[in-house]
Amino acid sequence: MMCDVHDDTDTGADTEDDVDQEWFAEEDESSPTPAKSSAPPWRILIVDDDQQVHAVTRLVLADMSYHGRSVEFLSVYSGLEARAALVEYTDIAVVFLDVVMETDDAGLRLAHYIRQDLGNLAIRIILRTGQPGQAPERQVIEQYEINDYKAKGELTADKLYTAAATALRSYRHITALESSRRGLEKIIDASASLFEARSMGQFIEGVVLQLRSLIPGARGLLLCTSSTRSRRNPTAPLSFQVVAGAGAFEGYQGRAIEEALSVDICQEILDAHRTQYNLFLEDRCVIICRSREYAASAVYLAGHPPLEPIDRQLLEIFCNKVAIGLDNVYLHEQLLATQRATVHALGKLAEYKDEVTGDHVQRVGRIARRIAERMRVLGFYSETLTDDYIERIELAAMLHDVGKVAIPDAILQKPGPLDPDQRANMQRHAAVGGSILTEAAGLVDRPTYLSMGAEIAQGHHERFDGQGYPAGLSGQDIPLAGRITAVADIYDALIHERQYKPAWPKEKAINLIREEEGRHFDPKVVEAFLSLVGED
């Protein structure tokens, strides 16, 4: 294949004297020379078996510039060579196409190949023929999806320029629409995946990943949020902190922007936030994320080519979605924090009545979560032990003894052994706790830490062999969360001092749990527990 690439100053081997004079009729030589741009040039493919046609086209359009971009020419001399060029160069904007080349209909076959085989509907095809009778205009336009039809004998320099400019304008609009469509698809897909994030860390990691996909040419990007000013303290000095960085800003996380970035970049970020206007410069930009609840945030992109208006709009749309996502994740985390505080208060209430020192309920919650995580690693009950289940069990296990609020202080605080009546009264706390939490859980439509807490409160004193209380359940009939919390609760109670006993050595407590495998405890829970204590 002969595919010659010429920039806007190369006119080929032919001289002006070789050019058919009719191509220069009506030519206006007073057109101003457009300014050069750093943007890539438009590619125009010339497909013609006549060398003079190539020379004339390059000569006439040598100084052409459209939308700040120059023109680059590809020259081929047959339909077969053109096919190879179209596969190699996927960004060709315009094809000047002859009809008669190696065959009488080579150009028409190429047009069909572009539209049907390649599925390229964006490229603009201008048919140029010296034999109009060979390819009647109406028939060609209707059958081959040609965008323009020119007879070579009528094509002056001005008309050639006009045809090229019109074709480039149309191509730009079509590709902008397609870019917009693809960009919006990316934003929709990104929004769906971002909004699945359950933590701020996951969300921010997703934002960086999607930004790199949306503007792949950026040398570096970072996301920063205000670290000192909040809605509760709006008069505090504004200081931004980097929460995520990529490319040139990799590893900047956790640093104040004044420490990590140049004075100019810091000022651009602060100015954009102060004015609440996004800043777009030739090779960098600042986009404000206008959150309602979360801290002031901004995205900074550097080292990218000049952004088209559509790219700017897509960035702004995406960052608006990011702002909504930041609010959602922040409110979700605040809700979890509120739940944890409520659970902690309820658990401490039971501890207070029992005069248990330390943070027994929190320790039991952490141990239960770690056992559940290890059971999943070992492949036990993997369908049940989802991320949501493991997240809920830590909170739910903290409520295991909430029913003790109904037990008389004289029984809870008795330093010695309980008599049979007192023991029966004490055992009521499991059923009472289950009842309280079941009623509370009924106010919510979906499973929550309250519904799991009810299972734990009522099930953590059941035994795997059926000899426990309050219902005498055995084996798999005991809720899994109750079986897990039973091990966590007894282990922590044994290794800490109570008013009726001293603290046991850890090894002694571990041995007891090992001995009770299959009787008091679920063997799979014990196996997971033992693998944990073997490490820690």
Image (cartoon, helix red, strand yellow):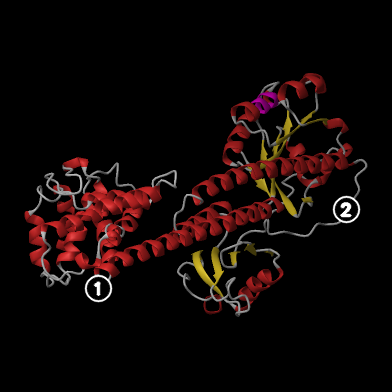
**Residue 434 left/right relative to 220:** left
**Image marks 1 and 2: residues in contact by CB distance under 8 Å:** no
Q: Residue at x 55, y 68 (%)?
A: 224
Instruction: Determine the CA span between mark 1 and mark 2.
Output: 89 Å
User: Where is residue 154 shown, x and y percent of the image?
Assistant: 88, 32
User: Where is residue 235 shown, x and y percent of the image?
Assistant: 63, 78
- Where disc 1 sits, the SS reads loop
Principal secondary structure, stretch drawn in magenta: helix
Q: Is residue 391 above or below residue 499?
A: above
Q: Which residue is mark 1?
A: 357
Earlier-in-chain disc, 1 versus 2: 2
Q: Residue at x 20, y 41 (%)?
A: 476
Residue 44 visible in the current orientation: no
Instruction: Tell me which amino acid carries mark 1.
Output: Thr
**Residue 456 left/right relative to 138:** left
**Residue 421 left/right relative to 186:** left
**Magenta-colored span:** 107-112
Q: Which residue is mark 2?
A: 31
- Where disc 2 sits, the SS reads loop
Q: Which mark is residue 480?
A: none
User: Where is residue 91 shown, x and y percent of the image?
Assistant: 63, 43
Q: Residue at x 12, y 51 (%)?
A: 520
- In-front residue for pair 249/332: 332
Q: Is residue 328 above or below residue 112?
A: below
Instruction: Tell me which amino acid carries mark 2.
Output: Ser
Q: Quadrant of the C terminus?
A: bottom left
User: Where is residue 134 shown, x and y percent of the image?
Assistant: 78, 19
Instruction: Find the residue positioned furthest to the right.
Output: 26
